[in-house]
Amino acid sequence: MGSHSHLFAQIDSLQTLKLDPVEVSVTRYEHSINSSTWSVSRLDFKESQDQMQQLYFSDYLNGVPGLLTQNSNNFSQDLRISIRGFGSRSAFGIRGIKLLVDGIPETTPDGQGQIDNLSLGSIESVEVIRGPSSILYGNASGGVISIQTPSELDHNYFKTGIIMGAYGMQNIQFRTGVKNDKTSLILLANKIKTNGYRVHSGFESSGLNARIKHRFNSKSELNVLLNFTDSPIAQDAGSLNFEATQTKRIQARDRNIQFMTQESVKQFKSGLSFSQQWSSNLFFSTYGFYAIRAFNTSLPFEFGGQVELDRLYFGQGAQLSFQGGTSVKHQVQFGYSWASQSDYRKRFMNNQGLRGDLTLDQDENFDAFGFYIMDELSSGNFKIVAGIRYDINTLEALDRFLANGNDSGSLSLNAWSSSLGINYQLNQNQYFFASYRTSFETPVLSELSANPKGVGGFNTDLSAQKAKNTEFGFRSLGKKSELEVILFNIQTKNDLVPYELESFPDRNFYRNSGETKRRGLEVAYSLKRSTFLETKISYTYSDFTYESFEKPNGDFSGNQLPGIPKHLVFVQTNFTKGNWKIIFNSRFQSSLYADDANKVKEDYFLLSSLNMSYGIKRGSVLWIPFMGINNLWNSIYNDNIRINAFGGRYYEPAPTRHIYGGVRLNL
């Protein structure tokens, strides 16, 4: 996958976007962020990880302009992430955004993503491509999030820690690293549980993550990744209407209690990557992965309200890079990826939490194959990157529940992707760049199987969403300050939009919306005031509208896309002096619409948090007590907005002010 973690520069600041020459792996070819022709952000947690709560993945994405997170506290529905609007439709899980962990795809071939199988304590850095990136990653690449876990060891170590907080939160963790001359092993185990802020919103999970790295020589490297997760329960308190949120915010929806809404997950995943530098100008890398996932859930309705899903997915890919040229240098790259996914889905009657008769039984398959070629040309202060890709996606449903007829069927959703970018170095510290990129996104299998006709098979009325992204950017780097400003314009076609039907209450269905126009501004600025004080500011302006969108109940052309605020501001101050480390951040989110008709508006809010730690060295042992306060100003806001929810049930209330604390022991 071209993951050169040994090339990453060490970053001393806490959780700070870096624009200085740091080699990044998310773009699959070796370069610095400065010379990138795309919008790329990097956050580092090597120094701040020991003082973090490690409960919400959203904490690891703070400050990335153009990126919005919601639904952090509903562990049954999972975190919702959107990048420039991609992913905002998700009713559960992560859609439209490609997830990678140590270069191995975490997103399934059909475009579903989740990180519930990854211990957050193992995250060392996060890299984000903002905007369409299908040229490198194919389906569902409206943005890319690449997570890196530690692989380098200075010495053998053992770490343990315990965190406790409000709402019965407990997080126990053990981590160890051992090495010899050529091989290293990093192992992390953790167990986490919480009762949740609302009634019926508890969560439990245990996990084990292992990474083995072996260097055959200075030019050849092998990485083996192993992961196991067991989450026996994640309850869903459901969404409320406005009146219910004013009466009692912590209450669960009555139907969610009645039907015992919750999910359980078990997953095992293994991955392998290998890289070989044959010469100074020829590089090869390959990867493979295999995963099984058992999923059971209860939903707040009777017909088909209990779901049993057994998933198997695996894949393999490779790339070959060649460098050459004198006055004009080329880095040509050929690559391919192949993956297959099989979902064995059953639905049963939900008799108030008890499993009833079978209502659906079908096998769903998604096979994906894509290949690309990309060339990077460098001459003087100019760099030009151009590439093209073709993806073949074959989907099939085999209906095994024949009582209501045979609804088996198949679909082919193939697509071309392209990219063209330029970077010009104005002087030693300033860069201008521009790019044109495309992406496509197929409906995921669970969305296709949500058939509004009430039968099995696929909803064949759905088609792939496509996007074209144009952006212009400027980066300026100084000894104490860094600035990045980006303007973008995205045209999308056939956006996938969720909705609910009165005849199937509480169940999400999907339709294509026509066309949208997304125009925005992203600004990131950091200032190092002194050796111990640093401030980071990011601002996002999003003007996202439907260009054409007609439904039976109205023409919504010209309306704002729901679920996306126009203004998003993030400010963070890092204080590090002696043994003290303090992080204070605030996020302002402007109002947003909850429905396509733009008749329901969610108010703006300001959210702040404070985190501090103090290191105590006793011989060879380092003690790190720490504490934090979330929602410092006790803001009343909603953690999630369920878009186009039936009956006005748009709102999932967020926790009020709460604290956590713990201690970590490093040997």
Image (tube, rainbow, N blue to C red):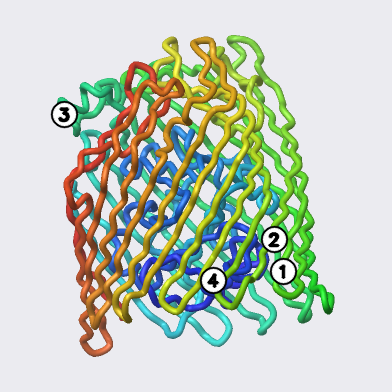
The span from disc 3 to disc 2 (Cα, nearest Å) is 54 Å
Sooner in the amino-acid sequence: mark 2 or mark 1: 1
Sooner in the amino-acid sequence: mark 3 or mark 1: 3
Q: Quadrant of residue 392?
A: top right
The span from disc 2 to disc 1 (Cα, nearest Å) is 7 Å
The residue located at (26%, 75%) in the rendering is 665
The residue located at (35%, 49%) in the rendering is 205
Sooner in the amino-acid sequence: mark 2 or mark 4: 4
Q: Which mark is residue 422?
A: 2
Sooner in the amino-acid sequence: mark 1 or mark 4: 4
Q: Toward the viewer: 146 or 199?
A: 146
- Residue type at tag 4: Ile
Regarding mark 4 in the picture, which secondary structure is present there? strand
Q: Toward the viewer: 322 or 474?
A: 474
The N terminus appears in which quarter of the rendering?
bottom right
Looking at the image, residue 339 lies above or below residue 532: above
Question: In the rendered structure, are the residues bearing label 2 and label 1 in contact, judged by CB atoms less than 8 Å apart?
Answer: yes
Q: Which residue bears the numbered disc 3?
A: 248
Regarding mark 3 in the picture, which secondary structure is present there? loop
Return the x and y of residue 12 as percentages of the image width and height: 40, 77
Sooner in the amino-acid sequence: mark 3 or mark 2: 3
The span from disc 2 to disc 4 (Cα, nearest Å) is 37 Å
Mark 2 vs mark 4, foreground winner is: 2
Return the x and y of residue 89 as percentages of the image width and height: 48, 33
Return the x and y of residue 461 as percentages of the image width and height: 64, 20
Q: Which residue bears the numbered disc 1?
A: 382
